[in-house]
Image (spheres, rainbow, N blue to C red):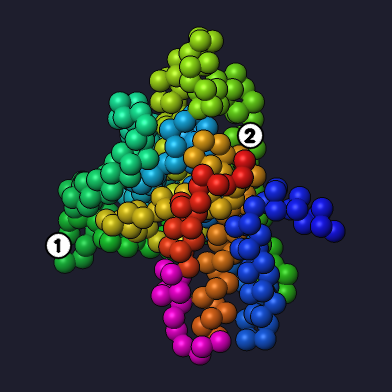
Amino acid sequence: MRNIFERAINTLGWARLIIAAFLLVLFCVAPFVGIRIDTSLSDILVRVGMNGIMVLSMIPMIQSGCGLNFGLPLGVIAGLVGAVTSMEFNWAGFFGFFMAIVFAVPLAIILGYLYAQILNRAKGDEMMIATYVGFSSVAFMCMMWLLLPYRNPLLLWGFGGTGLRTTISLEGFWLSILDKFLSFRIGSLFFFPTGTLLLFALACLLMWGFFRTKTGAAMMATGSNPLFARANGVDTDQMRTLSVIISTVIGAIGMVVYEQSFGFIQLYMGPFYMAFPAVAAVLLGGATINRATITNVVIGVILFQSILTMTPSVINNVLKTDMAEVIRIIVSNGMILYALTRKEQAKK
């Protein structure tokens, strides 16, 4: 028994064991305070699907030695531009969702390339530079959302007729288009978002396959030992650039997936802190700043989103007051702080 416990600690680490135990306690307490387990599980599954691809976008940059992608807002912005451009033409359903991705990907490639050129000139300080790149890009787009030539009345401020609204509803466009694809219910409350989870699984499979190609192996070699990689003819700067572009493109696609589940497009300062939950999730899953795997992504996003879903609900019902947003902020930022301060000790 002791050996099994020690192996579990060595494999999972104390952080994930403690969080998993806390989550188990929340699930045990939930029925006694009036919270249905089936509804909570549905919420968790939807959150895992809508956030999973953005967490997955962390892997290429980590594996190439560029560190954690705090510049994820660049990919998020590309996803937002793709979404509002699709809505400008009133495209709905799967076609509108697909066209949002089509518009987002080329912009993400351009932004990713420019982002990579900055990081290649700041080796050793990538995460700090990436943070400033992400923040400054969000601030820049606050001006651009007012100036871009969109004309669809559903997107614009009503009183002036120019400038995009802060929050735009996807109702009538492609709201929950993936969540409802091949979905099913058990009883009246449990909902399984099949389409979103299938897309997340497909993205994980493609990422796994990519890192088993020659290019993927060269990218991992660049991150683990750049001198050895260069000695074997690998252009390390090119690999770093490719990893940043891939990460930004996946972030853009992840944002479009996130939007269809969330139901709204949030512009202006909406993307400002979106990198931090993704960073925390992959670290809580066991990644380090030098190595990340698909398993780290899956475990991390499940733990992170489960805690964010269950904690406010349980505590609200215990205290009989609405503290959901306060608790959500405390829990999410506390987990991010813990993950970032423990990143060096995370298990490989």
SS under mark 2: helix
Give the x, y percent position of residue 91: 41, 49
**Quadrant showing the C terminus:** top right
Please say whether residue 334 is one of the residues in the magenta stretch: no
Q: Which residues are magenta?
A: 318-330
Which residue sits at x=51%, y=35%?
A: 290
Measure the C-alpha gap from mark 1 to mark 2.
Answer: 48 Å
Give the amino acid at mark 1: Gly
Which residue sits at x=56%, y=53%?
A: 284
Please say whether residue 328 is one of the residues in the magenta stretch: yes
Q: Which residue is mark 2?
A: 208
Give the amino acid at mark 2: Trp
Q: Is residue 14 left or right of residue 110?
A: right
Assign the magenta stretch its main secondary structure. helix
On residue 160, the disc is 1
Residue 223, relative to residue 289: is it above or below? above
Report the number of numbered marks: 2
SS under mark 1: loop
Give the x, y percent position of residue 136: 24, 45
Q: Is residue 115 visible?
A: yes
Give the x, y percent position of residue 236: 45, 19
Q: Is residue 181 visible?
A: no
Give the x, y percent position of residue 88: 32, 49
**Disc 1 and disc 2 in contact, CB within 8 angstroms:** no
Hey, which quadrant is residue 192 in on the image?
A: bottom right
Which residue sits at x=56%, y=44%?
A: 287
Which residue sits at x=52%, y=67%?
A: 308
Name which of mark 1 and mark 2 comes first in the sequence: 1
Q: Is residue 294 left or right of residue 72?
A: right
Disc 1 vs disc 2: which is toward the camera?
Answer: 2
